[in-house]
Amino acid sequence: MRKHSISFLKIKVYRRKFLGNAVAILVLCMLCFLGVSVFFTTIWAAQQRQEAQDTFSVVEKKIGTVKDQLNEYIESCYASRKMMQDARALFTAETEAGYVHKRLGNSKSSSAQIAYMPGDMKKLFVNRRIQVRGVTFVSGEGTKAVWLDRVSGDIHVTFGLKSEEEAMKIPGFGNMMLSSFEIRDPDSISRQLGTITFWVDREELLRGVSLSGAWAVMQGEKVLHADYGQGKEMKWLRAAANMEESQGWFYGNRYERIFYTVFPSSQYDFSYISVINSNTIWDLNRRTLIATSLVLVILAGGALLVSFLGIRNDARFLSNIMQMLGAMENGDFSVAKNLDIHEENKNEYGRIAIALKDVSQKLEGYIRTEYILKLKQQEAAMRALKHQINPHFLYNTLESIRSKALMWGDEETAEAITQLGTLYRMIVHCPDVISMKEEVELLEMYLRIMSLRFAGNFVYQLEVEKEAEEVRTLSFWLQPLAENFFTHGFDRDSEFNLLILEIKPEGGGVRVLMADNGLGIVPERLEATRKNMYEGSDDPDADIGLRNVYMRLKYFYGENFTMEIGNNPEGGARISVFIPTQAGKEGNCCIH
């Protein structure tokens, strides 16, 4: 049987079904991957926030320890009048000579030894817990820097600086402004002497602090310290600092999400900000994403394999049936007899094929004994036998095939057989004159069969207004018009072939309009088609279906009847028929 089988990829129905399944599985896997990625990204972002919170606790503790001790130091300075006198001298001096002169004045006015504030600050520089590297004094008289020479161990005071940032050029001065204090004159508390700012080395202060993303310590808009790899990460940090929510995400570019967390210190004047982009999160968790992708690929492959095997088996069954029916149609029952399908007898579809093969063999025997042999004896007996064949044999045969199809779960084949049997019974028993409603029901039976044949790329629409349903008309004239569409206008390359029938009252009669979106009638043949319909033609290739329908209806309805054929402006053909309601004869139809 395999040598006769047709690959399911050559059968349009199964090819589209397999491609549809493949696309559906691919889309489903992509949606699952996106869903899983979003789910895991949310979890990983939460883990990053927890890591940032832990890091913030470390940073807050380190900075808090230094700030507390600096506060204590400033308070001790305020407690010492001599220290504040020297601070005032340092703030108000513009040069080193001026500072020495003011200190000399303080010495003359005091019987005790005067204080030296820069020298007193040496204990801050040598304290490893505080790790102060420099101090700046800013006042109206200029900016001074106090710093420790690490080689000699001497304290130095540098005058005439243009800004505090210039002090960072001093070797070992420090590169992170940790805390600032406004100093007021102890003799006049309303008078501000200036500002003392303490500087530390950020690498030493934040040594051991690490985070996967970028982070920064900020005082308002001022960055005390930042750790980032690219310039755009600094933009993310500043953007996060201006967010209303303390945590969340925003788009860094069109597709990249930036997850941020802002931790404002409850005790000190600074905030800790952490940002990380989705690409970095995925890169850190690359193995998990790869494992998830592999699982989805395996599941998709398994689903495709199951779909492939199932469709292939269905295609084998259909291939067997098509070959049997094709051979039987040509009167060659030996082809069906020689088909080797016994290897599939354990498969339900194979059993159905075997059953149909048996039916063909029995039908061959019946024809041979009841028809062919008598045909050889006499031609007259053959004609009589032809008219005496009981149609119930065909009904019973079709019903037997339908039952077997239902038994094995092939509802589509069973439905096709049911529709075919019903339509055949109507053709045999229906009278010549029926109601318009019954004629449309006959057409719909035919269209249902064509819908099963062209499953997936044919749709029909029937619209009959209530007032037109009881109009009397001839039987089986709509079906040839629809058949004309499948013969000449049906586009097999199109995924959407549409046939529309509209029947509605119009000016003393009924207007019947049948239109499609098919290939239409080429302009060169349209005029010839109309002439053949109205006058007839000797051309053997001319369409006799339209001519027969026109002549039957013309004879039945008389002169007021019209029938026109043409193309739709948007594509496809259309046939318009006007039926006068005064004509017609009564009749009954045995539609069940």
Image (cartoon, rainbow, N blue to C red):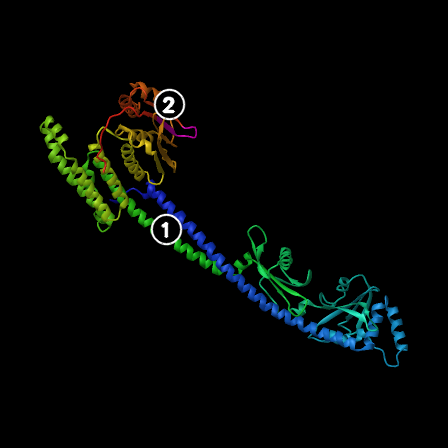
Image x and y of residue 553, in percent = 28, 24
**Tag nearer the camera, 2 or 1:** 2
Disc 1: which residue:
304
Tell me if 139 is positioned left or right of 23 in this view.
Answer: right
Report the number of numbered marks: 2
Which residue is located at x 36 percent, y 43 percent? 16
User: On the image, which quarter does residue 188 sit in?
Assistant: bottom right
Image x and y of residue 563, in percent = 34, 23
Q: Which residues are magenta?
A: 568-576
Whether residue 3 is visible: no
Which of 302/98 is in front?
A: 98
Mark 2 element type: helix
Tell me if 182 is positioned left or right of 202 in this view.
Answer: right
Which amino acid, mark 1?
Answer: Leu
Image x and y of residue 58, in percent = 61, 70
Q: CA distance from mark 2 to mark 1?
A: 48 Å
Tell me if 17 is positioned left or right of 587 in this view.
Answer: right
State whether residue 377 is above or below residue 532.
below
Whether residue 301 is visible: yes
Mark 1 surroundings: few (<14), some (14-19) or many (≥20) residues within 10 A? some
Disc 2: which residue:
526
Which amino acid, mark 2?
Answer: Leu
User: On the image, which quarter does residue 417 sit in?
Assistant: top left
Tell whether position 570 is magenta.
Answer: yes
User: On the image, which quarter does residue 592 sit in?
Assistant: top left
Image x and y of residue 82, in percent = 83, 77
Tell whether position 255 is magenta.
Answer: no
Which residue is located at x 33 percent, y 41 percent? 13
